[in-house]
Image (tube, coloured by chain):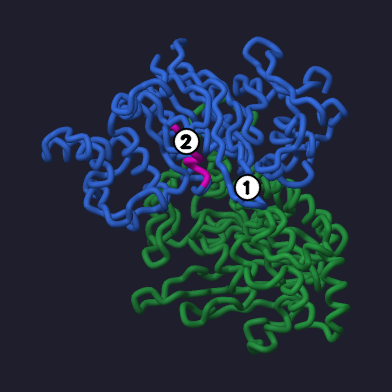
Amino acid sequence: MDKLIEVKNLRTSFKISGKPAYAVEGVDFEVIKGETVAVVGESGCGKSVMALSIMGLINSSLGTVESGEILLNGEDLLKKSAQEMQKIRGKEISMIFQEPMTSLNPVYTCGWQICELILAHENISRKQAREKATNMLRIVGVPMPEQRMDEYPHKLSGGLRQRVMIAMAMALKPQLLIADEPTTALDVTIQAQILELMRKLKADTDMSLMLITHDLGIVAEMAQRVIVMYSGKIVEEAPVRDLFKKPRHPYTFGLLQAIPKLDSSRERLYSIKGMVAPINEKPTGCHFHPRCPFVEERCLTEAPPMKVIGKFHRYACIKEEINYE
Amino acid sequence: MNEILLSVRDLKTHFPIKGDTPFRKKIIKAVDGVSFDLLNGETYGLVGESGCGKTTLGKAIIGLAPITSGEVVFNGQNFSTLPKNRLRETRFDMQMIFQDPYACLDPRMNVERIIGEIFRIRGMFSSTERKKRVYELMEIVGLSSKQAGRFPHEFSGGQRQRIGIARALALNPKLVICDEPVSALDMSVQAQILNLLVDLKKQFGLTYIFIAHGLPVVKYISDRIGVMYLGKLVEISLADKIYNSPRHPYTKTLISAVPVPDPDFQKKEIILEGDVPNPANLPSGCRFHTRCPYKRDLCVEMEPVMTEDSPGHFVACHFSGQL
């Protein structure tokens, strides 16, 4: 149970009309070596910003990581210089983005882009790098890898592009792979292929996977633990089975209920009313209170405490246990 | 309830594209012989991967894509023989809700103009009456009429989709074609919009064609489902039947590919290999044979025809009974 990465009180802010607005507001969690952690929540909950903060990819002209610690094997990434981070990104931690269309450079061949990454980190010849890249494409299941090496991204389908992205992210055997909605832009059949591939690659290495998604079906299939974020904060964290069988936070409950299930009859779908507040207009007290069906007087003023109810199971709600029957 | 509102017969939409030489034009067969009947008051779901022609089919029915051959009969009127002015008139009874709530609203018009535009074009109502009607429509879809002066960028994705729905309802249509109306939305907002669509259907007696690639959503909202692959329907049946006893191997893989939100669920996953083939270069025989796990020799040679497997359940596969 070695901790690979430990995030403590991470706060990331963006300047909105001169005032700092917090996209990530005091987040603590850890990722154990070799496990898959899913991060779920609606758009605008701060999932992606949290991932970008870990990667050190927050655009400094727009926002900053204000405080906190991100410990990778005990070393604080926030104290690293830009050059040092460049050495870590891609080698120790790498990331797959949602849009395989926009995250590859259209003017370079796929092979060139994978080689560039390998050459930036390893002191090997271009020929060796090319071999390594071709081999990587073969591992991720790209048909005819030698030919694909010399093709430009626009020639590939969405599924193949995502495979190229995965090949790139996995080329240097990182310890942590952050996948930000890796299959949202893909068809279900292609999604199944990509998820299967990620499962297989993870089983072959002892990599940890942080999977950001809003599809709870993917969470149930892939993850061991789940972190639920709302409005920049963690509202619940639990082992996957506990979360699905016995959600504690009303937001988690709402998310679970809102899914149309394939085997259910046609009753009315549960929906969470309203939407996530913009980060510069967060409600007082519990950020979820305007949408919560169980709201009370004190939710409006008091920030909910984090309650720990088991190993790896905690949630932030001021109320006593809610009966969701 | 049981009368046929829309009947599509052997509909084809082909797009010519540039071939290898100027004299050899290639043709993309986006929709290649689709037939189905839509009953008054039902919700007909169309599922399939991207590129299977489901959006083009929707657009061809409503007249936004050309029809190469085949017939569309709506409310007893055959679109291919109807004179142009009557055609336009009839098509007002069909409306469409688009996938991308960001792209389908004119950014320079406020909501009042967007929803009221159709009244202006048709010269309906006086300006005060028009305003009243727009406000009514906004309230119906769950927007506040106070927001009428706002522009699309001031709304969230879910709210924009509501604007699109209000616009589609403006002329009291009989049929609404919903093209992936919830794909771009978050799970919780998706539930809000689906509930709204179900409510509106009851309130106004609408008939829907619901196009989506997410099977759970289609299953939730539809009475009947048609599964499309490369321009053709491969299976048609009642929503429950499609899910509980799929006959076509493609339907089976689609169902098994959906991640199930239950950690204890043990699933038998059939993972398809490869991508959808290029529609400009269709496989011989059964179009699905290049990816089908049950492929036999016959499938490469002969294209299967749609047959009635059990009452109301149609499937186009040579071996549907034996799988």
Whether residue B222 is situated above or below residue A256 in the rendered picture: above
Task: Please give the name of the residue rendered at 40% of the width and 20% of the height, measured from the top-left corner.
Answer: B81
Tell how many labels: 2
Task: Please give the name of the residue rendered at 51% of the width and 80% of the height, measured from the top-left corner.
Answer: A64
Q: Which residues are magenta?
A: B177-183
Q: Quadrant of the C terminus of chain B?
A: top right
Q: Nearer the viewer, mark 1 or mark 2?
A: 1
Residues packed near mark 1 inside 10 Å, few (<14), some (14 to 19) or many (20 plus): few
Whether residue B252 is situated above or below residue B322 in the rendered picture: below
Q: Residue A66 location in percent, x, y?
A: 52, 80
* Quadrant in the rendering for residue A260: top right
Among numbered discs 1 and 2, the one appearing first in the sequence = 1
Q: Which residue is mark 2?
A: B66
Secondary structure under tag 1 reads loop
Residue B112 is tagged as: none
* Quadrant in the rendering for residue A152: bottom right
Disc 1/disc 2 C-alpha distance (Å): 23 Å
Q: Which chain is blue?
A: B
Task: Please give the name of the residue rendered at 73% of the width and 33% of the height, measured from the top-left corner.
Answer: B287
Magenta-drawn stretch contains B180: yes
Out of B118 and B260, give the one closest to the viewer: B118
Residues packed near mark 2 inside 10 Å, few (<14), some (14 to 19) or many (20 plus): some
Q: Which residue is mark 1?
A: B23
For the residue marked with disc 1, what is the amino acid? Phe
Chain label for disc 2 = B
Whether residue A157 is situated above or below residue A25 in the rendered picture: above
For the residue marked with disc 2, what is the amino acid? Pro
Please indicate whether residue A112 sits to the left or right of residue B187 in the image.
right
